[in-house]
Amino acid sequence: MPLSRFPVTPVQQSRLSQVDFNHLGFGSIFCDHMFSMTYENGAWMNPQIQPYQALAIEPGVAMLHYGQTVFDGYKSFRGIDGEVRIFRPEMNARRLHASCLRLCIPIMGADELGEIMVQATRQLIELDRDWIPSQWGQSLYIRPLIIGTESTLEVRAANSYRFIIMTSPVGSYFTNLKKGVSLRVEDRFTRAASLGGLGAAKTAANYAASLLPGSESRSEGFDQVLWLDSNEHRYVEEVGAMNIFFKIGGKVVTPPLGGSILPGIVRDSALTLLRDWGLEVEERRIAIDEVVAAFSSGELEEVFGAGTAAVICPVASIGYKGEIYPVSSSPPGELTLRLYDELTGIQYGKLPDRHGWIVGAPVSA
Ligand code: COI
């Protein structure tokens, strides 16, 4: 049953005129409105749309100290026909739901959460329709966030929460499809525990763990960190802002979802498209030594990442134990480009949506 519309408090004065759509960057500009809902006395309540604004929270809020917070990220696109399309929001709702369960956040059912997210997103899009960029490669990034808001220093799940959905006009997360990114294999620090950790949840701790290695690798001239498993620092995991794929000897290999990596929605979409095209795809553990051996034997054809922010992103080089492996001198590779073109083609309405991934967001002119 469709939800009724959420009540809206509109902004007095839009900030849209301050936005330079030619220099959007990623996630530093937020649209005029946000969705808000609270959890008090055992129930989610008070869903509404209000002006984007600061949250008033006490310094004693446990979330600030112990990290009881989850988020997700999905995008909507202004298509070549002017229609606005949201990409697979129900998948993000399911993942946010799973993240809540892992972080002990009392959440409604996954379907109900999905309906709320789609309805809220549609209303935000309608209200802030002029914020949706129109250039290919740009989009409206949608960031749901749930935080514990109880003020207590006891280490336990909070008894009150705030659920926000904010939106942000964005450009590409990584600069340039033709340049690709350089990755440094991290063999000292770990993103997430291999067994029973938080790696599959979209929660602050995983990103906090990545800050020092990320900063070190940037100071060494790399763009991102390629994580290995926490037990042996031997098997490839993910890149933090994207899942990773290798094309080796004609087959595509990507690490399996074992609980330590993020179940990426673009990862799932890429796997579906690759299988549609009849490629042999393996979701299996892949040791970094296998990647290096494939590079040395000339069998490593392409490496690319897949993520909501990153889209499909070519990897130009990999650094490991002081060596640089130049995977591709002229990215993107053929398969990387085909995937990028197919995925963005669906997202911007240039290609048919054969898998039912698009949710429409009607906007009046
Ligand atoms: C996303 O792709 O939505 C992400 O959350 C990556 C982000 C941490 C930049």
Image: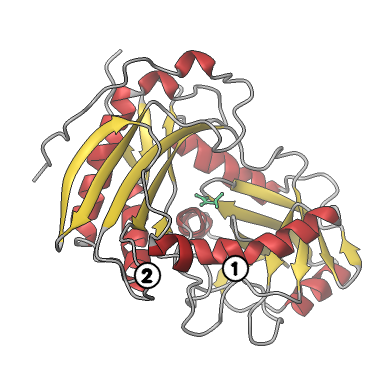
* Label disc, if present, on residue 103 of the rendered structure: 2
For the residues labelled 1 and 2, the Cα–Cα distance comes to 27 Å
Q: Which mark is residue 254?
A: 1
Q: Residue at x 38, y 53 (%)?
A: 58
Q: Image height check: is 265 above or below 22?
A: below
Above or below for 130 versus 59: above
Judge from the rendering whether residue 77 lies leftward or rightward of residue 20; answer left or right. Answer: left
The vertical placement of 50 against 174, above or below, is: above
> Residue 6 sits in which quadrant?
top left
Sooner in the amino-acid sequence: mark 1 or mark 2: 2
Residue 263 visible in image? no
As drawn, the residue found furthest toward the left would be: 1
Residue 277 seen in the figure = yes
Q: In the displayed structure, does residue 110 sit left or right of residue 275?
A: left
Label 1: how many Cα within 10 Å (few below 14, some 14–19, many 20+): many
Residue 78, percent across and down?
43, 26
- Check the picture and name the quadrant holding the C terminus: top left
For discs 1 and 2, the disc positioned in front in the rendered view: 2
Which amino acid type is marked by label 1?
Thr
Identified at 75% across, 52% down, the residue is 223
Indicate the secondary structure of the residue bearing disc 2. loop
Q: Which class describes the residues within 10 Å of circle 2: few (<14), some (14-19), or many (20+)?
A: some
Frontmost residue, 28 versus 136: 28
Query: Of residues 77 and 200, which is closer to you in this image?
Result: 200
